[in-house]
Structures are given as structure tokens and as C-alpha cells.
Image (spheres, rainbow, N blue to C red):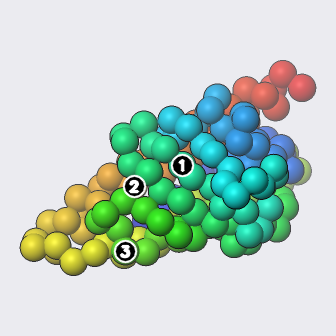
Amino acid sequence: MIVEHRLLIHAPISDVYQISQDYYVRYKWDPFPEKIELLNGVSGVRPGAEVRVFAKSGLIMDVQLVQMNPPSVAAVQMTKGPFFIKNFAGSWVFRMDGSTSTLAKFRYTIKLKFWTFPFFSERLAAFYFKKIVIARMQGLKNYSEARHRRD
């Protein structure tokens, strides 16, 4: 299953990307994580770094940063996750839209473990992750635009 959402953010691409990848600022705009930990003694966000995300919903997922190409792409792949997710990968892609706006696209590819009712479970998971993607993007948009107006 693929969950994707796009949103226009009225702030420069370099600012939006930096805000999206700053794990200290993330708590100010991202409604999803309760806590984010860098694993294995890593001190910075870079390809190969592993991160544990504790969601406010109670889910815990370890991901590895597989691609970072500032200011356009950040991508992760799950290394360990909730019992019902077999595979998870996510990308956040940013593209300039004029001189002071950014078109952001969040795309999650999710494969669930087999359940008794796959049709129902896929729909439920798609609804859940779509809701999260939209809320995260709206948070990034609101924070980025407010910060851009202050500068």
C-alpha cells in the first residue's frame, strides 16, 4: 500500500528541509512522535543513522536513514517495527515552487504482515497512515510559514 500527500508550503525549500530534519525542532511541529532517539551512539542525522521513533499512539519503530539529499530528499527504511508491519519505507521530497515556496510530498510504502482479514486491515492501516501524513504535513507547513513570516 502506498500513502502519499502533497502540500504547498509558503517558505523557501532550504528552510523547509532544515526544519523537517532537525529532530530538536521536530517536536514543535510534528504531531506524531512522542520521542525520537538516535541509536548506536550516532550524534547527527545522516545516511546510515538509525533512529527510534516512539509515536504518541504507542507504536515504536526503528528506521535507518537511507537517503539525504538536502534540500530535496530525505528517505527512511524500517529496520524494526510494530508487530503488524512487515515493511515500511518513507520519503519526504521537496521541490521549489517559485522563489519562496516549496511543494512537499510525503510518500509511505507499507506492507502489512498477513492478517485474518487483509482487506479490512489494509483499509484501516491506509486510513491511519493517511491521517498521520496529512497532520504531519500540515504541522510542517504551519511551523515553516510562521517562521518564514518572522524572518
- Residue at the image point whose x is 62% and y is 32% from the top: 27
Which is nearer the N-term, disc 3 or disc 1? 1
Which is nearer the N-term, disc 2 or disc 1? 1
Residue carrying label 3: 86
**What label sits on residue 82 in the rendered view?**
none
Q: Quadrant of the C terminus?
A: top right
Q: Work out whether residue 21 or residue 34 is closer to the camera in this orientation and state it.
A: 34
Say left or right for 16 vs 54: right
The answer to whether mark 3 and mark 1 are in CB contact below 8 A is no
Q: Residue 30, percent across and down?
A: 57, 38
Q: Give the residue type that dot 3 points to.
A: Lys
Q: Dot 3: what SS?
A: strand
- Residue at the image point whose x is 58% and y is 63% from the top: 63
Mark 2 neighbour class, 10 Å CA radius: few under 14, some 14 to 19, many 20 or more = some
Residue 86 figure quarter: bottom left
Instruction: Identify whether 72 is placed above or below 66.
Output: above
Q: Work out whether residue 69 or residue 57 is closer to the camera in this orientation and state it.
A: 57
Q: In the orientation shown, which residue stands out farthest toward the left?
A: 116
Mark 3 neighbour class, 10 Å CA radius: few under 14, some 14 to 19, many 20 or more = some
Q: Residue 120, percent across and down?
A: 14, 66
Residue carrying label 2: 130
The answer to whether mark 3 and mark 2 are in CB contact below 8 A is no
Q: Quadrant of the N terminus?
A: bottom left
Q: Give the residue type that dot 1 points to.
A: Val
- Residue at the image point whose x is 10% and y is 73% from the top: 116
- The CA span between labels 3 and 2 is 18 Å
Say left or right for 48 vs 7: right
Which is nearer the N-term, disc 3 or disc 2? 3
